[in-house]
Each structure stands twice: as C-alpha cells, then as structure tokens.
Image (cartoon, rainbow, N blue to C red):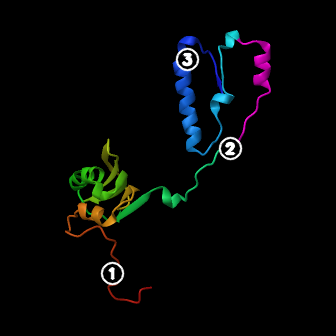
Amino acid sequence: MVLSKTSPEQTRESQSALAYFQKLMEQFGSRQKLAEKTLAEDWENMDEARWEQIRHSGYATADVEIPWFEKEDAFDSVYLLEPKASPEQIRQALPKLFDSGEAGRVFRVKGFYKEKDQWYEVNATKKKTEIRAIDMGQSVLIVIGENLQEEWIRQQIEFKTGCKSEYVVTNLGGTGK
C-alpha cells in the first residue's frame, strides 16, 4: 500500500488509515501485515531507488477469503399478496414493522396496492416512507429483512375486508381447466 503526500503532521491520519485497512483485511481472513508492506512517504522527498521499488512491486490475490453465502441467505422476504389496505392503514402499520423487534429486522417494504380505482406504490425504509399514486400495479407488498416473523407481520396489516393478506384460490365449480 502506498500512502503519498505524508508528512510528520499527518502521521496520525496515516496510522488511522493503515489501521482501518488492516482491520478490513482481517475481516476477510487476511494474515498479511500491511505495516510491513506499506510505503508512507512524501512523494516530493522520494529518491529514484524508492520509485524503482514501487515500479517493481506486485500484488497478492490469494490471501483473502471472500465469505460465500447463497442469495437466499442474504435476506428474508415476506410476500403479502392481494392486500386491500388503504394508504392510511399501510402508513399506520409501517412504523410497527420497522420499530418492533417482533417483526424481525425489517430493512424495506415495497409493493403496490389498489384502493377503489386508484393504484398506489409504497417504498419504505425506517428513515423514509413514500406512498404515491400510480397508473397501474400488481397487488403485493413485500417486506424485506432478516429473521422476519411472517405471522406477526401479517397480523399487523389489517385489510378493509377484515381478513388478513392471504392468497385464496377458490374453485366455483367447473372442471378446473
């Protein structure tokens, strides 16, 4: 690693940067000691031998372990299909989802729903909620996070019909074809 334009007045900043990068390397399983492989000098004061050392330096790629996980393990999703909630009902439910540990760790709520003849899009995080009217959509709310508690989440969103968000398929006779 090369820290350029350093001076005695910047020693603390250089050491802080080095410690930060060392910690990152260790988080990824590196056993390298960056202090042994770091050049921290003012470029203006470097001689030709130092420049040659930089020109002929290399890099190592095999020293870092990248943690592997399946995409499905990265986060959980709870799909609420065919919600009939009003924008106000959704607004009231969102803080509970983000603030209650009972929901799990909710990162985001996204989706679309319809009230009367108007479609709405919701995009919410703990810090910001946007609900806006749109031309068309598909009736679904998706809660994204970690360790989500699906039943608890479903209980928080009541619907105008009095039922929970469930996708119900009924066969009203016929052959099912």
Look at the numbered disc 1 and give the secondary structure of its residue.
Answer: loop
Disc nearest the viewer among 1 and 3:
3
Question: Which of the 4 quarters of the picture holds residue 23?
Answer: top right
| Amino acid, disc 1 | Thr
Q: What stretch is highlighted in magenta?
A: 46-61
Q: Position of residue 167 (x, y in %)?
A: 34, 72
Look at the numbered disc 2 and give the secondary structure of its residue.
Answer: loop
Quadrant location of the C terminus?
bottom left
| Amino acid, disc 2 | Asp
- To which residue does mark 2 refer? 63
Report the residue at 75% width, 23% height from top: 54
- Asked if residue 84 lies left or right of residue 63, the reply is left
| Residue 157 shows up from this direction | no
- To which residue does mark 3 refer? 11
Q: Where is residue 45 in the image (x, y as percent from the top left)?
A: 69, 9
- Measure how far apart labels 2 and 1 are at the Cα level: 58 Å
Q: Which of 112 and 4 is in front in this view?
A: 4
Quadrant location of the N terminus?
top right
Q: Nearer the viewer, residue 175 or 53?
A: 53
| Amino acid, disc 3 | Thr
Disc nearest the viewer among 2 and 1:
2
- To which residue does mark 1 refer? 170
> Is 57 inside the magenta-drawn segment?
yes
- Taking 133 as reference, is 142 above or below it? below
